[in-house]
Image: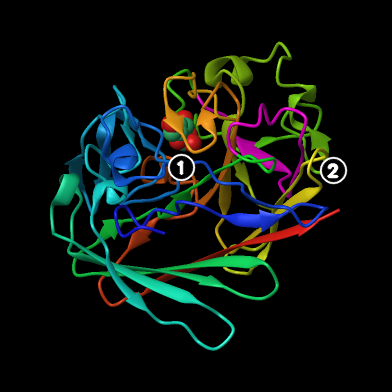
Amino acid sequence: ITNYGGTITAVRVPDRHKKIEDVALGFDSIEGYTAKSNTGYFGALIGRYANRLANGTFKLDGHEYHVPANEPPNMLHGGNRGFDKRIWQAKDVSKPGSPSLQLHYLSADGEEGFPGTLQATVTYTLNDKNELRIDYSATTDKDTVLNLTNHSYFNLSGPGSGSILDDKIMLAADHYTPVNKTLIPTGEIAPVAGTPFDFRTSMVIGGRIGASNEQLKFANGYDQNFVLNHKPGAMALAAKVEDPKSGRVMEIFTDQPGIQFYTGNFLNGTVHGVGGVYKFRSALALETQHFPDSPNHPNFPSAELKPGEKFHSSTIYRFSTE
Ligand code: GLA
């Protein structure tokens, strides 16, 4: 982990033959992360608002706020300089048997157009069950909106080892939030049943990715938010990825209401990271989150945070083999 962007730079886990490999995409030097060509948010913490805000606009308490439309016409992942491009204050908060790093960032009132002074704390913890746990917390001094996530890309065979299309994935979601052609949710909470978005039982990722389906066309693959079945606020299994090649398995548990399943459709071989060149669909991201563009959709779970409240959320990545 680096304090630049609170970024996870490597996740080293064994395969079925106990061979250790880094399964997270990233760079082996800080220059890789700060380079202009790095537009992929590799491993970074994302804020203040992860995913998209339509037209860089939202209303709160009757006031219209404008944030940078850094992916025209929308805001993506916090604007021009989101939490992924900030320096976090790091503190070792390890306990015996569980190494732990606490990161803190103070986001000034009005930063990237968002209201309120936001105190954000993110704690990464490892344990001897092969789990990486992320605890997010935040407070504000004015009403604001908040969506925090981590944008790690995984290839369970190791970065640069090929496509993720042969992996199997399970997503604990009966519904998803379809998007328009700029990847902004239409507001509909649509059933996955009978669509290529039905991963309620484990399915090969590439099985239906080429299907003639408007949603898959808009995103050039999977890049949608899935509505998790569990009661938001309660930790539950959200996703399970199995790599038949290495035998590695990754399970994700979260208390967040949604998870973005993204199949690396913007990777195009121009970024060179650890393991080689990052090609089209050579990694996947599973971003636990509030739904994209929630402030503009009253029917989505609220992403508001008020003074006096304490935001808290956790996500666990559990690694094993089969
Ligand atoms: C998220 C988005 C994608 C893409 C990546 C970063 O996963 O949903 O559309 O912007 O971040 O490249």
Name above or below for residue 102 compared with residue 193: below
Q: Which element type, helix, strand or loop, lies under badge 1? A: loop
For the point 26% across and 58% down, the residue is 144
Q: Earlier in the sequence, mark 2 or mark 1?
A: 1
Name above or below for residue 211 compared with residue 108: above
The x and y percentages for residue 244 are 83, 39
Q: What is the magenta segment's predominant secondary structure?
A: loop
Q: Nearer the viewer, residue 226 or 254?
A: 254
Circle on res. 10? none
Q: Nearer the viewer, residue 295 or 71?
A: 71
Numbered disc total: 2
The x and y percentages for residue 192 are 73, 34
Point out the stretch of residues depicted in magenta.
Answer: 159-179
Give the residue type at disc 2. Answer: Thr
> Which residue does the numbered mark 1 point to in the structure image?
26
Cα–Cα gap, marks 2 and 1: 30 Å
Q: Is mark 1 within 8 Å of ligand 1?
A: no
99 left or right of 130? left
